[in-house]
Amino acid sequence: MTFVEVVSKHKVKIEKLLRASAAAEAQSAEDLALAAKRAAIRKDKKEGAPAAYKEGSVGKPKSGRAVTRIQLKAALAGGSVSPRVRGKLARALKAALPAAAQSEVDARKLFVVPKA
């Protein structure tokens, strides 16, 4: 099922999706600590700084930026949205749906990109 079909089938309101996105993307204390750790590595400018990112020893914090109403309306209208926004919309939809319906949400199938 596509994003529009799942939203219409379960009658999920726009406001609920926006709130769920804000909650899912909010930064926690762990995210702030990760951001500070990454900043310290960049500040040192050691030769191993880029390697620390590549090795995965320093994770990426959440962006703290939720989906906007414009992005959500574009997705509901069938318009094109970026891959990052598609991921945020999938997380928000999964959080907004009841537990029984969450199994229907497959992020890869929600947004089918037509091949030209």
Image (cartoon, rainbow, N blue to C red):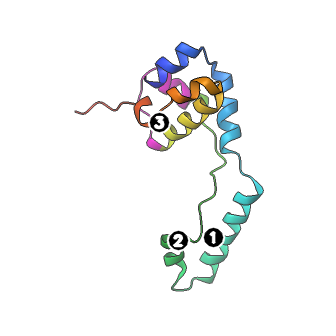
Q: In this view, does 29 lie to the left or right of 68?
A: right
Seen at 54% across and 76% down, the residue is: 52
Check contact, mark 2 vs mark 1: CB within 8 A. yes
Identified at 60% across, 28% down, the residue is 69
Give percent across and percent down for residue 4.
48, 20
Residue 53, disc: 2
Q: Which residue lies furthest to the right in this view?
A: 29
**Residue 81's disc number:** none
Q: Is residue 19 above or below residue 85?
A: above
Dot 1 amino acid type = Arg
Say whether residue 72 is magenta. yes
Q: Where is residue 26 in the image (x, y as percent from the top left)?
A: 70, 45
Provide residue 97's location: percent of width, then percent of height: 62, 25
- Over which residues does the magenta segment extend? 71-83
Crowd rating for badge 3 (residues with CA inside 10 Å; few <14, some 14–19, many 20+): some
| Mark 3, residue position | 107
- Tell me the mark number nearer the camera, choosing from 3 and 2: 3
* Of the pair 99 and 3, the residue shown nearer to us: 99
Q: What element carries label 2?
A: helix
Q: What residue type is labelled 3?
A: Ala
Looking at the image, which residue sits at the far bottom?
A: 47
Instruction: Indicate which disc, 1 or 3, sits on the residue closer to the N terminus.
Output: 1
Question: Which percent across, then down, holds residue 60?
Answer: 59, 60
Earlier in the chain: of badge 2 and badge 1, it is 1
Q: How far apart are marks 2 and 1 (CA)?
A: 8 Å
Left-right relation of 88 to 83: right
Figure check: 61 above or below 79: below
Mark with earlier residue (3, 2): 2
Q: Name the residue under label 1.
A: 38
Q: Is mark 3 on a helix, strand or loop?
A: helix
* Magenta region includes residue 78: yes
Amino acid at circle 2: Tyr
